[in-house]
Amino acid sequence: MKLFLGIDVSKGYADFLLLNEQHQKLEDIFQLDDNQQGHDLLKEQMKRWVKLYKPSIIYSGVESTGGFETNWYHTLLQCRKILPLQTIRLNPRGVKHSSKAELKRNVTDALSAQYIAEYLIRYHSTLRFNELANQDRDGYSALYNHIELLKKQQTQRINQFRQLIYNVFPEILMYCRNQLPHWVLYLLHKYPSADLVGKATVAKLSKIKYISQSKAEIIIKKARQSVVNDTQAGHEFLVAQSAEAIIKLDQEIEKYKKHLIKNCNNSSVTLLESISGVGTYTAIALLQEIGDINRFENTDQLAAYAGIHPVLKESGDKKYSFRMSKHGRAAIRALLYMPAMAAIRVDEHIKSIYHRHRAKGKTHKAAIGVVMHKLLRIVFGVLKNKTSYNKEIDKANAAKTQEANTKEKIEKAEIENKRRLQPLSKKAPISNIQYKKRKAYLEPQSAKTETYEVTPNTPV
């Protein structure tokens, strides 16, 4: 007999529901607090279930909920020493889509616990139970997550600041198209309007970091010709305070990054740093976002997890080829963009891949997407094999793969596999497009060149 325990975790407590293989409730749902008493009561309940139902195994699952599940998960791992128990952290998206497939739409704590237990019943044979978290990753995950939170706050502040600039000195926005330069922050912190900038001297402006004398002259000229003639004092105060807040938040983020880089030194980070374009912080961030590389059996799974794989849709006679799917972790894609830009400058092998796809007609961004995909495959190989990146080995592997997997060979293999029960025929009631495809496949190359018989002209 197998039992399935669904655990829906909330902040400070969790709901528990026990099902058997026939989806029958063996116990009414109960709720325990995330404290020592609650964890002790859970252990007592599981011991009682073992005596009462005599199961061969109990499968338990908790959804990943931003860290609220950690205490429960570690308690369940400890119970494995004395009980026939398997436990797992589940991706909430998988549980959600599984319940939707069963046409279940309502969501409560009780139903969520039931959905988790039912998910375990359906998929327990394919799930990876009892995975211990990587200690290096877990030790710094809180710090990394805090940095990412601060970066999101910084993005919000910058977007608000751009709007404020438009109200006090819109002409300066020409320098802020791609990013917000630090010298703009320093300038507007000290002179938070076009009127104040216009009254400043070139000598005073050129003392600001990254502002040269010639740039100071241009800025003052723009300020004196600004369309904003009368700036309210409230706007000036907001601009000055916002600029100061962004500068301080930048400094705070850099302080946390330096601490993370200094202390999170392990073999996996060193391996990832060997990849062209990947720096220390990017290596640490990739490890945090990817987690345990052994979760992925191949590069296709990792690419799908990151949403960096190309999407192909085929239906009947038509094939629709799309660009990068973007159905995955956006953070990984963001981390790979700048390394891809750097790699095409410093690595001849990666550079050749970029230019090969550009020559095929791809845009710059599409070709960079291909390079990002390539870097992710290299990340997979480096972490799986625990060896540093070697572009010569990667070239050799790519050549073998390209030779074995040409487009024609792949398409021919697919057709032969699909038509293994019935030979391909042009006489089937098929569309004109399908007829041409089958004709091209069935006729030998020599027969594709049509010949015409020349006859002499005959009188009418």
Image (spheres, grey):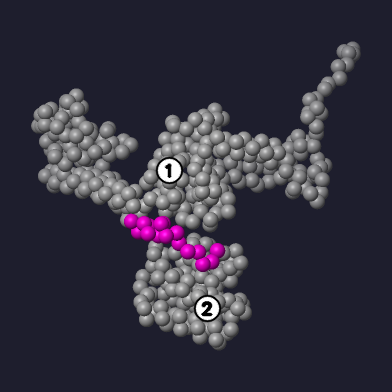
**x and y percentages locating residue 449 in the rendered image:** 79, 25
Q: Name the quarter where the C terminus is drawn.
A: top right
Please say whether residue 140 is one of the residues in the magenta stretch: yes
Q: Quadrant of residue 197?
A: top left
User: SS of the residue at dot 2?
Assistant: loop
For the residue pair 100 and 71, the one nearer the viewer reads as: 71
Residue at 49% from the left image edge and 81% from the top image edge: 46
Q: Position of residue 90 (x, y in %)?
A: 49, 64
Q: Which mark is residue 262?
A: none
Question: What is the C-alpha distance between the residues marked 2 and 1?
Answer: 43 Å
Q: Residue 132, how many percent across, how many down?
A: 47, 64
- Determine whether, in the image, residue 150 is placed left or right of residue 2: left
Q: Is residue 408 above or below residue 263?
A: above
Q: Which residue is mark 2?
A: 83
Residue depicted at x 66% and y 39%: 405
Name the secondary structure under disc 1.
helix
Location of residue 326 in the rendering, given as x and y in whole percent from the top left corner: 49, 47
From where the camera sits, is residue 211 visible?
yes
Count of numbered badges drawn on the protein: 2
Q: Say which amino acid is labelled 2.
A: Leu
Q: Is residue 19 left or right of residue 256?
A: right
Q: Which is nearer the eye, 320 or 338? A: 338
Residue 32 can be seen in this image: no
Disc 1: which residue: 273
In magenta, the rendered stretch is 128-143
Q: Quadrant of the N terminus?
A: bottom right
Asked whether 134 falls inside the magenta stretch, the response is yes
Residue at x-position 49% and y-position 56%: 292
